[in-house]
């Protein structure tokens, strides 16, 4: 079978895609700082291990460290792990934070439409947590930040927003 051909015995899935034991797609290709796949064999930025369960504080510190290093895609992966392992009551918060990081990723990649959409979706997902204690996060400030940048992007601003999950100066790298 040629590279990229469909495998009729695999429910229409691409035969050349990396898959785990359960058949879920994996992408083992190297990636750049913004998470874009690079050609196989080209050195890339080390990937975040998947499925790491951290405390909320550890999650926020690691995600912010990656954001401060200009690696919002990797920060999104850390926040996505929290989203997938969180209790139902806080799952929307982690999903929204992950979407904010993906919004920054899209902005850095020059995908203005994707950036605005993800910042808006992220804000919509964290909004229900406004006014409630949420791991030291200022949800009101994050909502203002996300909606303000989504509007600026829609108005043609090309600036990549800088996301600080908690108030205060960036965490040291």
Image: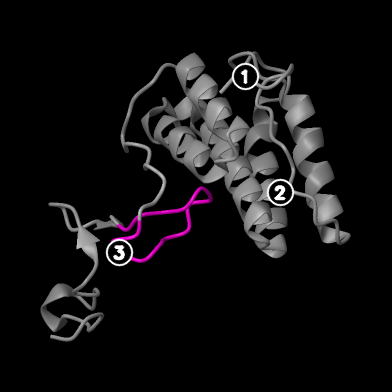
Dot 3: element: loop
Dot 1: element: loop
Q: Quadrant of residue 148?
A: top right
Q: Mark 3 touching mark 1, by CB under 8 A?
A: no
Picture residue at 48% right of the left edge, 18% below the top:
56
Q: Horizontal and vertical percent for residue 165?
A: 65, 26
Query: Where does the C terminus fall, quadrant-wise?
Result: top right
Q: Which residue is mark 1?
A: 171
Viewer-nearest residue: 64 or 89: 64
Decide: is 145 above or below 12.
above
Answer few, some or many: residues within 10 Å of disc 2's Cα (few below 14, many 20 plus, some between 14 and 19). Answer: many
- Count the labels in the image: 3
Q: Which residue is mark 2?
A: 120
Residue segment shown in magenta: 29-42
Q: Nearer the viewer, mark 3 or mark 1?
A: 3
First in sequence, mark 2 or 1: give its number: 2
Q: Is residue 25 left or right of residue 157?
A: left
Q: Which residue is mark 3?
A: 40
Answer few, some or many: residues within 10 Å of disc 1's Cα (few below 14, many 20 plus, some between 14 and 19). Answer: some
Residue 119 in the magenta stretch? The answer is no
Q: Is residue 166 left or right of residue 16?
A: right
Q: Mark 2 touching mark 3, by CB under 8 A?
A: no
Q: Horizontal and vertical percent for residue 151?
A: 84, 52
Picture residue at 44% right of the left edge, 40% below the top:
77
Q: Horizontal and vertical percent for residue 99?
A: 58, 44
Query: Where does the N terminus fall, quadrant-wise?
Result: bottom left
Dot 2: element: helix
Whole-angstrom CA distance, mark 2 to mark 1, is 25 Å
Judged by its main secondary structure, the magenta piece is loop
Decide: is 87 above or below 21.
above
Residue 32 in the magenta stretch? The answer is yes
């Amino acid at each position: 079978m040629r590279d990229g051909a469909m495998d009729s015995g695999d429910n229409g899935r691409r035969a050349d895609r990396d898959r785990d034991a359960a058949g879920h797609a994996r992408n083992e290709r190297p990636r750049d700082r913004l998470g874009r796949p690079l050609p196989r064999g080209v050195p890339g930025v080390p990937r975040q291990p998947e499925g790491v369960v951290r405390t909320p504080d550890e999650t926020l510190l690691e995600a912010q460290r990656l954001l401060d290093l200009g690696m919002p895609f990797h920060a999104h992966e850390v926040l996505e792990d929290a989203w997938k392992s969180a209790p139902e009551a806080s799952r929307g918060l982690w999903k929204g934070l992950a979407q904010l990081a993906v919004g920054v990723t899209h902005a850095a990649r020059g995908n203005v439409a994707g950036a605005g959409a993800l910042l808006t979706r992220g804000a919509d997902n964290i909004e229900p947590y406004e006014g409630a204690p949420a791991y030291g996060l200022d949800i009101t400030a994050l909502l203002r930040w996300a909606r303000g940048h989504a509007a600026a992007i829609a108005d043609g601003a090309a600036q990549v927003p800088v996301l600080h999950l908690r108030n205060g100066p960036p965490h040291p790298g």
